[in-house]
Image (cartoon, grey):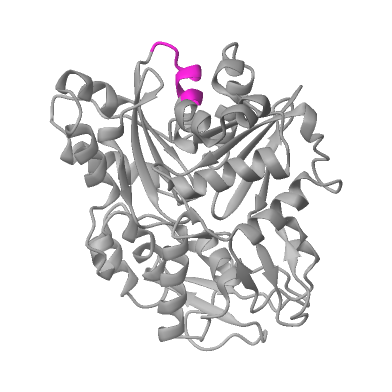
Amino acid sequence: MATLVLDNGAYTAKIGYSQEKVSVIPNCQFRSKTSRLKTFTANQLDEIKDPSGLFYILPFQKGYLVNWDVQRKVWDHLFGKEMFKVEFVDTSVIITEPYFNFSSIQESMNEILFEEYQFQSALRINAGSLSAHHYFHSKPSELCCLVVDSGFSFTHIAPYCRSRKMKEGIRRINVGGKLLTNHLKEIISYRQLHVMDETHVINQVKEDVCYVSQQFYKDMEVAQMKGEENSVMKDYVLPDFSSIKKGFCKPLEEMIFSGKYKTGEQILRLVNERFAVPEMLFHPSDIGIQEMGIPEAIVDSIQSLPEDMQPHFYQNIVLTGGNTLFPGFRERMEAELRSLAPAHLPVSVLLPTNPISYSWEGGKLLAHSPDYDEIVVTREDYEENGHCICEEKFDI
C-alpha cells in the first residue's frame, strides 16, 4: 500500500509518496492578463508566457480552506495522470490542516477524501505535529520541542512534549508571507512604481532582496547615507517577460549611484524596504497590527507551561515555514529570545536545511513508523461510523 504525504499549505502544497522525494507546488490557480479565460492550475504556472498582472485564485482565506472548488481542481491535477497517478483504492493519505481547524472544514475534508476520492485510509494532522515528529526522530534524547511555523497566512508557535502537543501553549500571530508581500507592494507603489497588481513579481522581489536586520536603527542610519557608503541599497531589475524572464539584483560593480541607467531596464531601487518589511514579523505593531512579535509570543507560550519543562523548550526551538528563509532570521530570533528569556537558561534555535519541506519529511517518517496503521482512519471505519470516528482519532 502506498502512502501519499500532502502538506497542504495556503501558498504551496508539499506532496510526494513516502518512498520518494517531495515536490513543492503552488496550491492555487492562476489567470494571466493576456489569456483571461484560461485558468492555469498549480505547476502549470510555468506555461504562462507573460506572468505580469498574474491573478491568483487561492483555496485558502486567512489561513483556512474555504474555496473547495479551487482546492478540488488543484487536487485533481496533483492526483491525476500528469502528476502523481494516484490509485485511490490502494493509497493511504497523510494531509495537514491548521491548528483548531473549524469542524465544518474538517467534515468537508473527510467527505472529499473518503467519498469523492475514496482513499483507502487517511490521517489528518497539523503540520507542526509532523515537524515535531521529525525533530524528535532526529534528536531521540529530547523530550520537548517548540515548533515555530511562519507561513503564508500566519505564524503558529506550538510546544510539543513527547510528541504530544500542549494546547494551552499554542499561539498564533496573524502575520505571514502574504502580509509581507502585500505591504512591500504598498510601499513600492507609494514610493516608486504602481505594482499593486504584480503580486507574483513583488513576491519574487521580497524573496530576493529582503533580509532581517540585526540592529534595526543602525541599518536605518546606513540606509540614509549617500552613494557608495549606503551598503543597504540594492537595484533590482524587474522582468519584462520577453528578454528578462525573472527579476534579479544588479551586481554591485554595475550599480550607478547617481543618474540613470542607459540600458532601458526597469529598475526598482530598494533601500530600507529590504529590512523594514521582514521586521513586521518581530514588531507587527509597526504597521498597526496590535499583536506580539514572534519572540515575545514564544516567551509567552513557554511561560504558560509547567515550570520544570520551560528550560527544555528554550533549548529546542525549531523554525519552519518560508519566512524563516530570510537571511538573518535565525540569528535575530536567537538574540531577541536571549534578551527576553531568564538569564540562567540556555537558548538554542534550530533552522533546518529545508524549513519549507521539514514537516513533509516528518510525514514521510511517520508513514514508515510501526504504529502508523493504528492512527489512521480507514474507509471501512468511516463508512461505518461517519465523521465522529475522525473526530475521535484525529487530534486537530
Seen from the viewer's position, the closer of residues 226 and 221 is 221
Q: Residue at x 35, y 78 (%)?
A: 226
User: Can you give x and y, in whole percent of width and height, for residue 60 in the image?
Assistant: 53, 58
**Image quarter in which the N terminus is found:** top right
Magenta-colored span = 133-141
| Tag count | 0
Q: Which residue is drawn at 85% across and 49% down?
A: 82
Task: Classify residue 191 as left or right of residue 194.
Answer: left
Task: Classify residue 176 as left or right of residue 300.
Answer: right
Q: Is residue 163 magenta?
A: no
Task: Classify residue 303 as left or right of residue 161.
Answer: left
Seen from the viewer's position, the closer of residues 73 and 318 is 73
**Image quarter in which the C terminus is found:** top left
Q: Quadrant of residue 368?
A: top right
User: Can you give x and y, in whole percent of width and height, for residue 270 in the image?
Assistant: 45, 73
User: Can you give x and y, in whole percent of width and height, for residue 168 in the image?
Assistant: 25, 34
Task: Classify residue 39 as left or right of residue 334.
Answer: right
User: Can you give x and y, in whole percent of width and height, for residue 58 in the image?
Assistant: 58, 63
**Can residue 13 be seen here?**
yes
106 is higher (above) or lower (below) than 194: above
Seen from the viewer's position, the closer of residues 230 and 128 is 128
* Dominant secondary-structure state across the stretch colored magenta: helix
339 is higher (above) or lower (below) than 20: below
Q: Quadrant of residue 279?
A: bottom left
Q: Residue at x 57, y 48 (%)?
A: 108
Q: Which residue lies furthest to the right in this view?
A: 81
**Can residue 15 be seen here?**
no
